[in-house]
Amino acid sequence: MHSLARRFLKTAIVFLVTGLALGVWLLLRRELGGAAISVRELSAHTHALLVGFVMMMIAGVALWLFPRPAAEDTRYKPRVAEAAWWCIAPGTAVRVVAETLAGFDPPPALRLAILAGGVMQAIGLGLVFWTLFPRIRAAGSAQREAKGERF
């Protein structure tokens, strides 16, 4: 497994722990303190788990397991996958922190941070799948299909 795939996977685990801790904290506040949970706090919890954990895990595993690009394929650029990590990880972290701090009526600076984090997430996820798309191809199955094998 190469270092970038490991970085995606380890970052995913950090976001899983963050999302679970945030979820327990929100649950304790609601059930023991009677505090209302804001939509932004719920969004922070959801983004930590779904983008931070699930999507980073999917990206890391895909980068690790998908077939290497063909030698003549000029569309594949490892730096794009690297840029994707640099968009998704900090973007998700900014969004989780800003939405957790925002409460019910955030100041403009937190609103901008939330927006910036969300845009970074979207760009990063787009880059991941742009990078993976040329790697979605038949590796050995093309020969088996040519021989008449059905799946």
Image (cartoon, grey):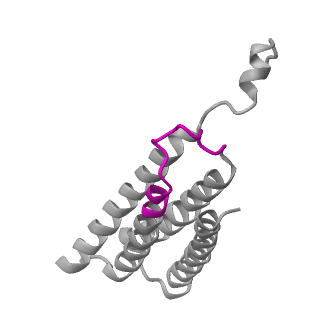
- Membership of 76 in magenta stretch: yes
Residue at image position (36%, 70%) is 40
Q: Position of residue 132 (x, y in %)?
A: 53, 45
| Residue 120 seen in the current view | yes
Height in image: 133 above or below 95?
A: above
Is 55 above or below relative to 10?
above
Q: Residue at x 47, y 83 (%)?
A: 34
71 falls in the magenta region: yes
Residue 76: x, y in percent?
A: 49, 46
| In this picture, residue 120 sits left or right of residue 4 | left
Q: Which residues are magenta?
A: 67-83
**Residue 84, x across and y down, in percent:** 44, 60
Point 69% across, 50% down: residue: 65
Q: Residue furthest bottom?
A: 33
**46 versus 76 height, above or below:** below
Q: Which quadrant does the C terminus fall into? A: top right
Nearer to us in this view, 44 or 87: 87
Q: Nearer the viewer, residue 27 or 69?
A: 69
Looking at the rendering, in which quadrant would you find the N terminus? bottom right
Considering every residue shown, the one lying at the far front of the view is 72
Q: Position of residue 123 (x, y in %)?
A: 36, 56
